[in-house]
Image (tube, rainbow, N blue to C red):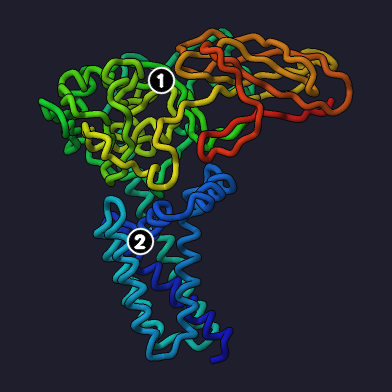
Amino acid sequence: MNGKRRLLSAAAVGLGALGAGELIAATRGGSVIDGVGRLLADTAPIPVVETTVAMAGRYDKETTRAGVVFGAVAATAGMAFLPQRLRAPAAAAFGAGAAALALRGANQSVPSAFGGLAAAGVLRAGLRRPPTTAGGELLWATAGAGLLAAAETLIRREDRRHTERVRQLGPMGSHPPMAEDGFGNEPGLSPLITKAGRFYVADVNSRPPRVDPGQWRLAISGKVAHPLRFSLADLAEQAVEFDAVMVCVHNTPGAGRAGNARWFGVPLTALLEHAMPDSTATRLVTRAVDGYTISLPLEPLRTGEWPGYLVIGMNGEALPPEHGFPARVFVPGLYGQYTGAKWLAELELSDDTQVDYWWKRGWPSDALWVRPQARIDIASGGSDGPGKTTVAGVAWAPPQGVAAVELRIDETDWLPVELGAETAPAAWRRWRTVVDLAPGTHTIQARVTGRSGEVQDGAVRAPFPQGPSGFHTVTVTI
């Protein structure tokens, strides 16, 4: 075969092998692709992570999975140019590496490792007797694509079953979220409470772990006088409701990586009081079922200076799996990356020897507080008369709250706008105004001032390493 034919032949075999391995892993509750994707998320240089987040947006997980498939097929295609005697060993090494990566990864790693080994076996056999015609290549590629589709269908079906089981747990909260601020339902304006399905999702896993609600227990351990274990029912008895905005550290001005929810959780002050931390404990380590950790300074959480919660409910229901079921830690005012782990397994009281996931990646060890930010949701004219333009949006400055929101047209003076009623200081606040604009093109900017006195910073800065800044700017034409 010529070089092009060898390349296509090996790529087709690679796709077929990956499909076979992925389906075998999926039948056992795992995923080779997701296991490798998690490793990429864990080890990729910060510039690669930041570029992926910026370019892929809410589709970052899908982008990672597609990248794994492309990379695997490309790697196997490259094996076609190895000497014949080295192809089988290379295939075996490739599959063993995939299995090792899966074992290194998060939960469900053993099924993923089986899938990786199965893929290695198919790949080795395929490279020994590769297809030599276009029809053979098409058969391998079609089979691989079909197996990948079947595996994806199986994984999604199991994810839906798990989600339905979580929903059947019943209400998590005393009443449904019916917050009002006097603005009603303005078309295009973000609601006061963000539905779970519209709430942003940000984490390092390709998919949420499936945690059995009946078997799950939260452990409080480490430097404590009384190690404790709680079931969901135990926690629900002590939980309270609160409204708060959660913001991703990658939420650049105007972006959608922020949401406002009615949460149901146990104040960390109560849990820590029961556990009685040792005098040498300085950090509260929040550890997920897959080993991912985020730690927080203990003292402000213990005293209540930082109002932290162990959250088990969202908008009147149990936490959806993608948002951390069965529990997550949330400290209103901290960026989501720093506020606490999802899919909690343990709260460990530790000392300053603790090193967190993101610290190893180059992010600061000090907690990052959400910067005040205003977002423009609506900038449209016509409904209030010729030249009248309605401008509305949301603003946040947790945990103290929003004091004022202002607009600037074409970089002139800042003008105050009407604020909706505040549901909670840590929640976002809606705002609205009508401006009279002359025919032509105009730029509109928004900024917020928090009750702490901090005014939104207009200097444009990327998220890494201290969080983004800048004014949300939109352009309208009258």
Q: Residue furthest left?
A: 226
Crowdedness of circle 2 by 10 Å Cα count: few (<14), some, many (20+)?
Answer: many
Query: Residue at left 53%, top 40%?
Result: 464
Task: Give the image location of residue 434, x and y in percent.
Answer: 74, 13
Q: Amino acid at mark 1?
A: Arg
> Which residue is identified by label 2?
32
**Above or below, comparing residue 28 to residue 141 in the picture:** above
**Above or below, comparing residue 412 to residue 84 in the picture:** above
> Which residue is identified by label 1?
262
Looking at the rendered structure, the secondary structure element under dot 1 is: strand
Residue 461 falls in which quadrant of the image? top right
- Tell me, yes or no, if residue 404 can be seen here: yes
Residue 117 falls in which quadrant of the image? bottom left
Task: Give the image location of residue 313, x and y in percent.
Answer: 33, 25
Task: Give the image location of residue 36, x and y in percent.
Answer: 38, 59
Q: How many marks?
A: 2
Q: Amino acid at mark 2?
A: Val
- Tell me, yes or no, if residue 264 can be seen here: no
Task: Give the image location of residue 106, x and y in percent.
Answer: 30, 51
Query: Residue at left 51%, top 77%?
Result: 138
**Above or below, comparing residue 67 to residue 450 in the picture:** below
In the picture, measured across the screen, residue 176 lies left or right of residue 75, that is: left
Identify the mark nearer the N-term, 2 or 1.
2
In the picture, measured across the screen, residue 252 lies left or right of residue 218, that is: right
Crowdedness of circle 1 by 10 Å Cα count: few (<14), some, many (20+)?
Answer: many
Q: Residue furthest right?
A: 439
Q: Nearer the viewer, residue 312 or 136?
A: 312
Q: Nearer the viewer, residue 262 or 361?
A: 361
Residue 216 falls in which quadrant of the image? top left
